[in-house]
Image (cartoon, rainbow, N blue to C red):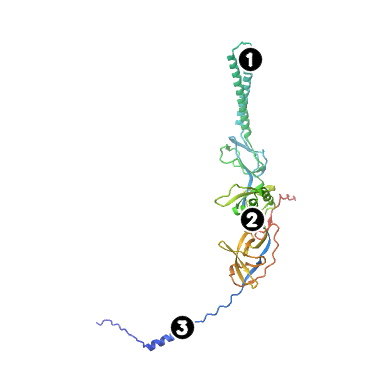
Amino acid sequence: MVSGTSFCVKISLTPIASLSALVLAIAFLSSCKKEAPEAGPRPPVPVTLGTVIQKDMPNHKEWIGNLQGTVTSMVKPNVAGNIIQRYYTEGTTVKQGEPLFQIDPAPFQADLDRAKADLATAIAQETKVQQDFVRAQNLLAGKVISVQEFQNQQQNYQAMVAQVASKQAAVQSSQVNLDFTKVVAPIDGMAGLANYEVGTYVSSSSQQPLTTIVAIDPIKVVFQVGQDDYLSMISESLKDPSNAAHQRKENQNAGMRMILSDGTIYPHNGTFRAVNNQVSTQTGSITVEGNFPNPGTLLKPGLFARVQATLGFQNNALVVPIASLITVQNLHQLAVVGPDNKVSIRNVNLGFTTREEAVILSGISAGEKIVVQGTQKVTDGCTVAPLPTASPTPASATGPAENGTTKKIPAANPAPAAKS
């Protein structure tokens, strides 16, 4: 039996052959390498330019608030009993003193009748005791009775007078409870839904009120103002404390504007109503309230709205479009374009801003050109190609439109349509 045999062939190359192979490989690799094209100049970046303008700039501010009633009254029963009637229509306006509910008055009428009867008995007894007291006075003067007997008659009379007064108070209390069975509106306002139906037993300890009445003309808007904005509101008073009353009056007369959540511009201006007595340490803001007329009670509590107000003016302010600002962390920059269309990224100090414009405190001059659209594509030293800008559409007198349209609501209830 012959076992398997393996063969190994060893090939040896001479030094000359190895060198030749290496030269051929280098030549092959060199032929495959392509020369990289030289980088040309970067083309100009197309951007839209704007101009730094100088003008008197009103410090417009905007906050998010919600509407509330100026007075909210929880109508609760003062006596216990079954509701036998509801007088008002839910969701309608009621006047102070107008009846809302009737609680069964029969038990309270019986208590009143009983108290009146007790009072009549007490008055009759008082009359008799008074006569005895007068007789005792005459007998004492004639020395017919002793002083002790006279004092006893006097004490009986005084006790009877007190008892009559107690019975009179009981009658008044019973009358008050009887009157409480008719629940009336404590304020003028809009009455809400009834929480209890006719036949329900209610008392002063019931969990829910019978209903809620809210005074909503004028209606109150409540919003949170940051401490910086608050300091702007009181800046003049801080400079001259004697000017505080005048500044407060100016703030009230300056007025506020309200834009509802769907972009509807409310046609009536409001006024500052009150400011809370402390700034929240958690949010760094203070609660401010304003009043807006609400003819026809169209606005309801619970609605959210934007509140706009003007907190003074800055004269000869440098103003740029808000879109031109480049913000990196807390650093604000502008892309300034020179006469050769080259960009210089410049740090600026930012003042107050609005929804459309920003006030620049320093770092730029009036009349300089800046990049408004395309700031994310420019770098320091690059060249830009200004794009033509369309003629701006005149802004509405009432402010910027929402979603391309401006809506208004009527100032009062619309006139009823004529019947055909």
First reached walking from the N terminus: tag 3 or tag 1: 3
CA gap between label 2 and label 1 equals 85 Å
Q: Secondary structure at mark 1?
A: helix
Q: Which residue is mark 1?
A: 137
C-beta proximity under 8 Å, tags 3 and 2: no
Q: Position of residue 408 (x, y in %)?
A: 69, 55
Amino acid type shown at disc 1: Gln
> Callout 3 environment at 10 Å: few (<14), some (14 to 19), or many (20+)?
few
- Marker disc for residue 61: 2
Q: Is residue 251 above or below residue 138?
A: below
Amino acid type shown at disc 2: Lys
Query: Which quadrant holds residue 396?
Result: bottom right
Q: Secondary structure at mark 3?
A: helix
Q: Is residue 262 visible?
A: no
First reached walking from the N terminus: tag 3 or tag 2: 3
In the image, what residue occupies the spot 64% across and 46% down? Answer: 69
CA gap between label 3 and label 1 equals 148 Å
Q: Is residue 110 above or below residue 191?
A: above
261, 157: nearer the viewer: 157
Q: Is residue 261 above or below residue 177?
A: below
Q: Which residue is mark 3?
A: 29
Q: Position of residue 320 (x, y in %)?
A: 65, 63
First reached walking from the N terminus: tag 2 or tag 1: 2
150, 175: nearer the viewer: 150
> Callout 1 environment at 10 Å: few (<14), some (14 to 19), or many (20+)?
some
